[in-house]
Image: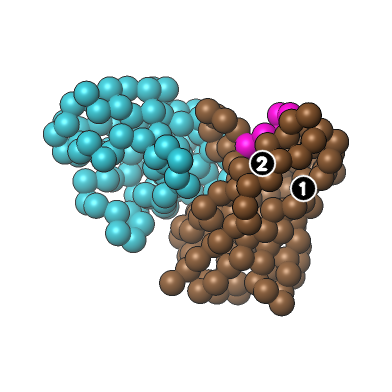
Chain colours: A cyan, B brown
Amino acid sequence: IVMTQSPASLSVSPGERVTLSCRASRSVFNSVAWYQQKPGQAPRLLIYGASTRATGIPARFSGSGSGTDFTLTINSLQSEDCAVYYCQQYNDWSFGQGTKLEIK
Amino acid sequence: QVQLVQSGAEVEKPGASVKVSCEASGISFAASYIHWVRQAPGQGLEWMGWINPNSGSTNYAQKFQGWVAMTWDTSISSANLELKRLKSGDTAVYYCAADGGSGSFDYWGQGTPVTVSS
């Protein structure tokens, strides 16, 4: 299963809302997770089951979607949200290529 | 508290083999596989496969079949990843990760850099 993320990168001002997209090459039902990775660090689980926040993840992170189309929304963007975000489907565990989020 | 602690950085020559370990604590292996993921410099995440600590069964991504081996050492609760016949393209950070009940990768090791260079 191929996971395709868009856009590849974007730059957003603090306080704004950003939406990242992920499309699966075939239906993965709701078996999608989102991860945040900062430079030099291991990825961190943000969302699983397409829309469930992992333990300790702030409420401004939310996920939605099912089937083949999924989104990660970050409300009230903060400087510490600067990172690369990956989606993953856990039917056969493949990752998207990532979206690099920069803060203006 | 779940912890995945990986072994240190490795430098190997092309054609050699390398073994990376991931010592796990605080996790229920009854419901959790150990996965391996690699990340080449400046690139994205690539799933390599998993091992079931209870049975020792493995499942490798097709790309890695035949030259990667995942094992489990029950005595020290450690997963091992062996890479054989290394090439320069295998230079990457290798992560172990575990499912904590979400179905995805709740827990990650700190990563082990492997450099393949002559």
**Relative horizontal placement of residue A5, taking residue A15 as reference (left or right):** right
Q: Which mark is drawn over residue B94? A: none
Residue B62 appearing in the image: no
Kindly identify which residue carries mark 2.
Answer: B114
Residue under the image location 76 percent in, 40 percent down: B12
At numbered mark 1, what does the secondary structure look like: helix, strand or loop? strand
Q: Nearer the viewer, residue A100 or B11?
A: B11
Kindly identify which residue carries mark 1.
Answer: B18
Which percent across, then down, holds residue B84?
82, 43
Residue sticking out furthest to the left: A15
Which percent across, then down, holds residue B76?
67, 74
**Relative horizontal placement of residue A12, taking residue B82 as reference (left or right):** left
Query: Chain letter of disc 2?
Result: B
Which of the image's four quarters has the N terminus of chain A? top right
Predominant SS along the magenta part: helix
**Are the residues tagged 1 and 2 within 8 Å (C-beta)?**
yes
At numbered mark 2, what does the secondary structure look like: helix, strand or loop? strand
Which of the image's four quarters has the C terminus of chain A? top left
N-terminal of the two: label 1 or label 2?
Answer: 1
Quadrant housing residue B51: bottom right
Residues packed near mark 2 inside 10 Å, few (<14), some (14 to 19) or many (20 plus): many
Q: Is B42 drawn above or below residue B65 in the view shown?
A: above
